[in-house]
Every structure is written in C-alpha cells, then in structure tokens.
Image (cartoon, helix red, strand yellow):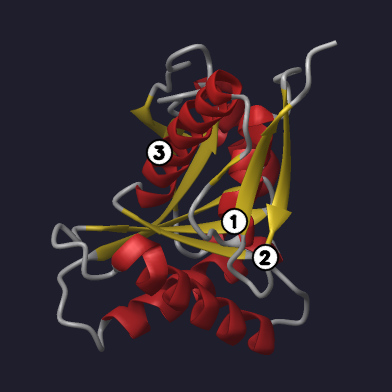
Amino acid sequence: MVEFEFEGKTTEEAIEKACKELNRPKEELDIEILEPGSAGIFGIVGTKKAKIKVIIPEEEAKQPEEKDEVAFAKKTLEDILMLIPTEAEVKAGIEDGKIVLDIHGDKSGLLIGRKGKTLDAIQFIVNKIINKSLSRKVQVVVDAENYRQRRRDSLIQTALKLGDKAKRIGKPVTTNPLTPRERRIIHLALKDDPQLDTRSRGDGLLKKVLIIPKKKG
C-alpha cells in the first residue's frame, strides 16, 4: 500500500485535490482526515490547513506519472535520512502541483537546524537529485514537524508588530536578513495595510525588508 497526503483550506478542498491528482472519484478513495483545518486568528495568524491521507494499492500507485514522481521523491529523501542518525519517517503528498515531503519524528530539531537552514539544504539536495533524474521539472518542498507553517506564523506576527511600530514612531523599521521566501511572507502580510509600504533592501540572497509608514495627507 502507498500513502499520499493532501492539504487544502478545507477538508473538501483537500479531497478535491486528491481526486484530481490521483484521477479517481471520491468513492474509490480510502480517505483518512488527519487535520480538519482551522481559520486561525483573523484568518491570518495560526491558520491551519486541512490535511487528509489517501491509501491506494502499490501497483495502482504507479500510474499516472505524477505518482511515480512522488514515490521517487519520497525514496530519495529517505535515502538521505538513512545517512543521518535519526529515526524520522517521511510522508509524501501533492499540494498545489508541488511534491510535499513531511518528516515526522525529528523531535530534536536536528533536521531543521538554525532558522531552518539544514531543512533548506536537504530540500535543495532533494530537488537537485529529482530534477536531474526526471523527464520534467518538478518542485519538491521538504518540511519537518510542521516547521514551515510555524515559521510562517512567526514571520507574520513579526511583520504585524513591526508594522505597528513603524506607524507608531512614524519612521521606517527593518527586519533581520531574510531569504526570498521569508521576505515574500512579510510583504504579503502587510500588502493590504494602506498606511504602510514595504521593500527589500540589501545585496545577495539574504536581504532585509524595510517597512515604511506612509505620510498622512
């Protein structure tokens, strides 16, 4: 048997993704709801996606091609983890056209590293191996113990606090140096605030986000 995990804003959306990706009607899927999902605070902070698990026979999981890619990505990450002293296991799924590999059991944070740097390095290696071996380009996201969602929530909270500070003191404030993905979270968290502008500042991969209060009148 092969397990696949799918996420969505709601359980129904996750099931729809499963049906589409696996090319099967809902009635033919063995579905287990892992997380019902929640809207969080104001629909921003603490939002949790609904997550389901779908189990299908291994021989059926070999078609269509996308399932082969998921299985190959899962095996690639498992091979890498065998070289690291950890008892973590990998669950695989597809979300928004991306292969998502979730590592469970890394309670020590060894595979995450400081600010997720080890996790990003593992993700980079997995993507390099996958895209060198497959006939088409795919994107693989590697997560561990829901770190990326927790990091996203933390960055949103930081953005809101810094935005409030910029408006209170009437001067620009900056974040710490962030990766492109982290900067995008900051920009998106504040993009609908009519009193603020944001822009990236610095050179290289790691840049700060400048949060600028707009002048009144």
Secondary element under disc 3, as helix, strand or loop, is helix
Does residue 200 show up?
A: yes
- Residue sitting at x 43%, y 28%: 48
**Does residue 161 sit above or below 86 in this rendering?**
above
- For marks 2 and 1, the one nearer the N-term is 2
Q: How far separated are the C-alphas under marks 1 and 3?
A: 16 Å
Count of numbered circles in the view? 3
Which of the two marks, 1 or 3, is nearer to us in this view? 1
**Amino acid residing under circle 2:** Gly
Q: Are marks 2 and 1 in contact (CB under 8 Å)?
A: yes
At which x and y percent is residue 160?
A: 51, 27
- For marks 3 and 2, the one nearer the N-term is 3
Badge 1, how many Cα within 10 Å: few under 14, some, many 20+?
many
Secondary element under disc 1, as helix, strand or loop, is strand
At which x and y percent is residue 118?
A: 36, 73
- Residue sitting at x 54%, y 58%: 178
Q: Quadrant of residue 106?
A: bottom left
Does residue 25 show up?
A: no
Q: Which residue does the numbered mark 3 point to in the structure image? A: 154
